Each structure stands twice: as C-alpha cells, then as structure tokens.
Image: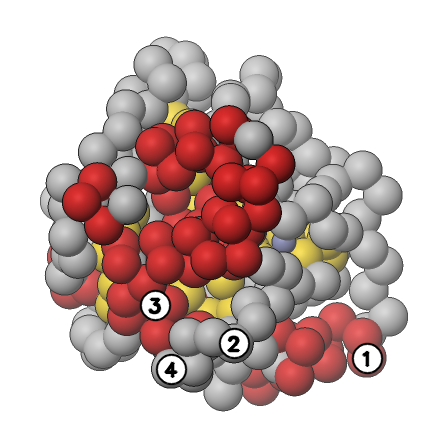
Amino acid sequence: MESMKWDVKVLCLTASVCRRLRATAKRLLWRELCLFRAPRITESLSNGVHSSRMLGGWPSLAKLLFFCGGCNSTRNFVMSRSKPGHFVAESRFSKTSGMSFLMKRCRNDLLFVSDPCEHRLGDQEDDLGVFRGVFRGFRESMTRACLIARQAALEESERCPYCGARVWSMTAAGLVPRKAAKRLGSHDGALEYFVCVNGHLHGTCWLAPLSSDEGEDEEFGTDGTDGTGNSSGDGGDHPTARNGFRYDGFNDRNT
Ligand SMILES: [Zn+2]
Ligand SMILES: [Zn+2]
C-alpha cells in the first residue's frame, strides 16, 4: 500500500473487494492513509497517539480529508439544484481558518477547516463554496457545551456526510461568527454549516465575485496548516480550490 502512495481510490477498491479486506481497512488502513497523506492534521487530531481511537472513526476522517460532500438545499440555505460529492485533487485545512468559525468564547477549541471548494451552479447565480472541517476532542469542546447550554435541537433531515451521525445547524443555533463569511469570501449571512455529534463540520456558502483586495487576512497567523493531496479526478464537476488562503500553504505529498 505504501508503494501505491496511499491512493484513496485504490484503498476504496481494496476495501470493497471482500469483508476481510474491508475489516482490515477499517482497523488499520484508513488510519495509515490519514497519517501518510495528511500527517500534521492527523497528528494534531490524535494528540500524537496514532493508535488512539478517532471520534467518529478513521474511515470518516479519511473521507472528510479527501472528499468534498457536495451540497443540497437545507432549511436555511436554498439553492436551485444540488451538487454531488467528489474526490478532491487537493485540499488545504488550517486551524487559522477554523478559528474564523469559532465564537469568541469557544476560541480554545481546535477546529480545522478547508478552503471552500467552488461549485458553479449557473450564469445567473454566484458560485457555491462547499467547505468541511473537523474538531479535535469535540466531546470536551466549548462549542459542544454552548450547543447543549442553548438546548439547540439536532436537525431532523440533515446528516453528517462523513459519519452519518446527526448534526446541529450552527446557523439555527446562532453560533456563526461574522468573521466566518469574511474568511470564506462570502457575504454576511450567505452561509450555513453543520457540526455533527462527532465533531465533523460541513457547510455551504455563496461566494462573492472576487475583487482585487480579496484574500488577505492579517488577523491570523500561519501556524498549524496542513495539506492533503489526491491524484484522483473530480467526477466531472470541475470544482477548483479557491485561491484565497495564500498564507496557509504547505502541501504534504501530492501525487
Ligand atoms: Zn466540491
Ligand atoms: Zn460526522
């Protein structure tokens, strides 16, 4: 598997061959894939203990790192049509970006969020940005404590695209900081995101057309970034990574 440079599609095929291989993949290979392809974010999420259990499971984390979940209309975010998910050629996750999605009182939480993946809907509409992220130790996080304290209800019809668990709408819970829209290159209020009970985040936003001063964010530092790479195609949807996070760049192995 090492010689295949941990190709995600090869691993998916391997896991689908038979039950025994699937069990091995579940127990071992997905974790190794995360470590090989995205070592820094994986180290950080697992506190450096590689044998540790991952909240929501290693397969879910692998999917989150290498798969854009696409998007459907939700009750707070309506779009003319839905977009399917797809493997991503390259994603960058950073905790600097994650900070923009945390309310002030939750800023001690550790959250990694990806650049938005651009999806074109039509000439009459702004492009859609699809982003995803993951908390470290979500069960002990202040964000979860806030959701519980506010008695935020879990969504009825929305599920986490990565682990299938139930989710909270951060929009409905009133826990979306204004800096989140700025970070994404979106208008205020033109975004929606969900966090599942295992701490996976997924969301969508309308991307404002680029202007010349777009992209700089002097408010945050450059630490804690991570890149994930994948040689796979994107299922014909041709989304591209938005080039608005130039401070966060470092890439792990790209194949
Ligand atoms: Zn996408
Ligand atoms: Zn989840």
The residue under label 1 is 149
Give residue 52's mark: 2
Query: Is 177 located above or below residue 36 in the figure?
Result: below
Few, some or many residues within 10 Å of mark 1 (<14, 14–19, 20+): few
Marks 3 and 1, how far apart in space? 29 Å
Residue at 49% across / 36% down in the picture?
A: 15
Marks 4 and 3, how far apart in space? 10 Å
Residue 55 location (% of width, % of height) = 61, 67
The residue under label 3 is 41
The residue under label 4 is 48
- Which is nearer the N-term, disc 2 or disc 1? 2
What's the residue type where badge 2 is placed?
Answer: Ser
- Which is nearer the N-term, disc 4 or disc 1? 4
Residue 214 location (% of width, % of height) = 20, 50
Can residue 154 be seen here? The reply is yes
Marks 2 and 4, how far apart in space? 9 Å
* SS under mark 4: loop
Query: Is 27 located above or below residue 222 in the figure?
Result: above
Dot in front, 4 or 3: 4
Marks 2 and 3, how far apart in space? 14 Å
- Which is nearer the N-term, disc 4 or disc 3? 3
Question: Between residues 49 and 119, which one lies in front from this camera angle?
Answer: 49
What's the residue type where badge 3 is placed?
Answer: Ile
Dividing the picture into quadrants, the one containing residue 246 is bottom left
Dot in front, 2 or 3: 2
What's the residue type where badge 1 is placed?
Answer: Ala
Labels 4 & 1 near each other (Cβ < 8 A) = no
Quarter occupied by the C terminus? top left
Question: Between residues 159 and 39, which one lies in front from this camera angle?
Answer: 39
